[in-house]
Amino acid sequence: EMLRSLVGSEMCIRDSTGAVPWSEIQDYYAMGDIFVSASTSETQGLTYAEALASGLPILVRRDECLKGILNPMKNGMDYNEQDEFLHGYHYLAGKIHEKNLKEEIRESIHFLAVDTFAENVEKVYQGLVG
């Protein structure tokens, strides 16, 4: 209720669903407009990458695991304080209907795609062996 009072009645809040089958994950992300997380315990940022791969902008607590993932004002916003959250929410809510936003967000994490990731791992390996 506190969150709803801060951002207004236009925000529909869905609580975490817990574990869902891998084959259905994209369906859950497709229900939203903005992925919001207050977690500071993500170690790999998988949920953030999943949301971005689904084309959702992310509004997340400032966290070291987001370096290289979050590109502020491009694919999401981060926050520590309430006023930063509100700014981020209103900024992203104003962008969610832009024509190419979802595709731009997906492209922002292209480096995590299987082929690109494998190529980068191979480059590191080649650099080590020689």
Image: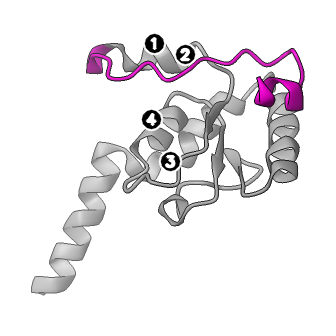
Q: Which residue is mark 3?
A: 109
Q: Circle 2 — which element?
A: helix
The tag on residue 50 is: 4
**Is residue 75 rendered to the left or right of residue 95?**
left
Mark 4 and mark 3: Cα distance apart in space:
10 Å
Measured in 3D between alpha carbons, the distance from the residue under mark 1 to the one under mark 4, in whole angstroms, is: 11 Å
> Cα distance, mark 4 to mark 2?
11 Å
Q: Nearer the viewer, mark 4 or mark 3?
A: 4
Q: Amino acid at mark 2?
A: Ala
Q: Residue at point 79% right, 29% down?
A: 2
Most prominent secondary structure in the magenta stretch? loop
Q: Quadrant of residue 113?
A: top left
- Structural distance between the alpha carbons of marks 1 and 2: 5 Å
Q: Amino acid at mark 3?
A: Ile
Quadrant location of the N terminus in the rendered image: top right
Q: Choose between 105 and 50: the one closer to the eye.
A: 50
Instruction: Return the disc, 1 or 3, that comes first in the chain's sequence.
Output: 1
Q: Earlier in the sequence, mark 1 or mark 4?
A: 1
Residue position for label 2: 30
Q: Residues within 10 Å of mark 3 (few under 14, many from 20)?
A: some
Which residue is found at the position 47% from the left and 46% from the top?
110
Q: Residue drawn at (56%, 20%), measured in percent from left and top?
A: 15
Neighbor class of circle 4 (other Cα within 10 Å; few <14, some 14-19, many 20+) is some
> Residue at coordinates 52% horizontally, 21% vertically from top-left?
29
Q: Magenta residues, as a range?
A: 1-23
* Marked residue nearer the N-terminal end (4 or 2): 2
Amino acid type, mark 1: Asp
User: Is label 1 in contact with label 2 (beta carbons under 8 Å)?
Assistant: yes
As rendered, which of 109 and 20 lies closer to the eye?
A: 20
